[in-house]
């Protein structure tokens, strides 16, 4: 994974092992705690809102059948199709 300052994840990734691995990379995990956790870690709802925008972007890209099923064999062609689809989604 590329270097990042903050990792946004959902409740499914709320485990001590994942948090330790993320912090070992020098990244701050922003993961909402599960309801049944005894120790609740710090969590920023304001920063977590960015994750929703990322999720919506991936949902829009998956609307393109070529992207969702990965018709292209070469990674270069697939990346070009993703760029075209992202441009179309951005314009809409």
Image: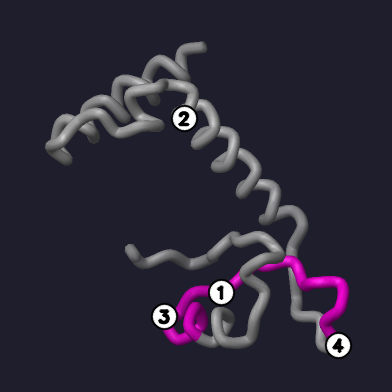
Badge nearest the viewer, 4 or 3: 4
Badge 1: few (under 14), some or many (20 or more) residues near its Cα, within 10 Å? Answer: some
Point out which mark residue 63 bears.
none
Query: Which residue position holds label 4?
Result: 38
Query: Which residue position holds label 3?
Result: 25
User: Where does the image place residue 15, in percent across and percent down from the top left?
Assistant: 65, 80
Residues at marks 1 and 2 touching, judged by CB atoms closer than 8 Å:
no
For the N terminus, give its image quadrant: bottom left
SS for callout 4? loop
SS for callout 3? loop
Badge nearest the viewer, 4 or 1: 4
- Is 26 on the left or on the right of 54, as rendered? left
Real-space CA distance between mark 4 and mark 1, rounded to the nearest whole angstrom: 20 Å
Query: Which residue position holds label 2?
Result: 62
Query: Which residue position holds label 1?
Result: 28
Q: Residue at x 43, y 65 (%)?
A: 4
User: First in sequence: mark 4 or mark 1?
Assistant: 1
Real-space CA distance between mark 2 and mark 3, rounded to the nearest whole angstrom: 30 Å
Q: Is residue 73 above or below residue 26?
A: above
Badge nearest the viewer, 4 or 2: 2
Q: Is residue 16 above or below residue 88?
A: below
User: Where does the image place residue 80, in percent across and percent down from the top left?
Assistant: 21, 28
Q: Residue at x 54, y 64 (%)?
A: 7
Real-space CA distance between mark 4 and mark 3, rounded to the nearest whole angstrom: 25 Å
Badge 2: few (under 14), some or many (20 or more) residues near its Cα, within 10 Å? Answer: some
What are the residue bounds of the magenta stretch?
A: 21-37
């Amino acid at each position: 994974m590329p270097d990042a300052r903050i990792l946004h994840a959902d409740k499914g990734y709320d485990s001590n092992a994942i948090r330790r691995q993320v912090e070992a990379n020098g990244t701050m995990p922003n993961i909402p705690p599960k309801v049944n956790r005894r120790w609740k870690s710090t969590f920023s709802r304001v920063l977590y809102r960015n994750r929703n925008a990322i999720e919506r972007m991936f949902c829009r890209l998956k609307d393109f059948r070529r992207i969702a099923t990965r018709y292209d064999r070469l990674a270069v062609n697939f990346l070009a199709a993703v760029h075209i689809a992202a441009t179309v989604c951005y314009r809409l």
